[in-house]
Amino acid sequence: MNHRQRKILHAIFAHPINANLGMHEVISVLGNMGAEISEAKKGKMHVSMNGHEVNFEHVHHSLPKDMVVKVRKFIELCGVDPAVDYPL
């Protein structure tokens, strides 16, 4: 994972919640963490990683804050700690 992707990963976990993250950037980060990503029905992205699965709505602009929280919870559920596993 390159430095830019690490910054995006840490932005997902930033407080207050960052509302300036693009879907393409987040999908790129998840892909580099080993997630399998595929298109699902009706504009959704199916993501599976470490035995866990989730569907995300494919938005064309910045992610809403509730989706950032959903991505954050999914990454935590998969057992990834950005500070330890992907330090800046």
Image (cartoon, rainbow, N blue to C red):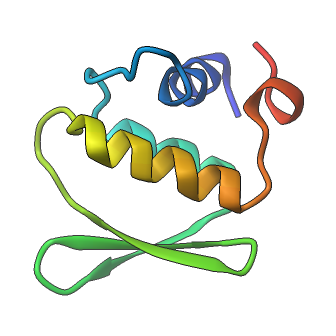
x and y, in percent, of residue 42 in the image? 11, 81
Question: Residue at left 70%, top 34%?
Answer: 1
Q: In the rendered view, does 59 fall on the left or right side of 25? A: left
* Quarter location, residue 18: top left
Question: Residue at left 27%, top 35%?
Answer: 65
* Quarter location, residue 40: bottom left
Q: In the rendered view, does 37 fall on the left or right side of 39? A: right
Q: Compared with residue 66, is residue 19 higher up or lower down, i.e. above or below? A: above
- Report the label total: 0
x and y, in percent, of residue 43 in the image? 14, 72
* Quarter location, residue 50: bottom right
Q: Nearer the viewer, residue 2 or 77?
A: 77
Q: Compared with residue 25, is residue 6 higher up or lower down, i.e. above or below? A: above
Q: In the rendered view, does 85 fall on the left or right side of 6? A: right
Which residue is the extreme one toward the bottom? 41
x and y, in percent, of residue 46 in the image? 40, 76
Question: Residue at left 23%, top 38%?
Answer: 63
x and y, in percent, of residue 67 in the image? 31, 48
Q: Compared with residue 14, is residue 74 higher up or lower down, i.e. above or below? A: below
Figure quadrant of the C terminus:
top right
Residue 27 at least partly seen = no
Residue 75 at least partly seen = yes
Q: In the rendered view, does 20 fall on the left or right side of 59? A: right
Q: Nearer the viewer, residue 77 or 49?
A: 77
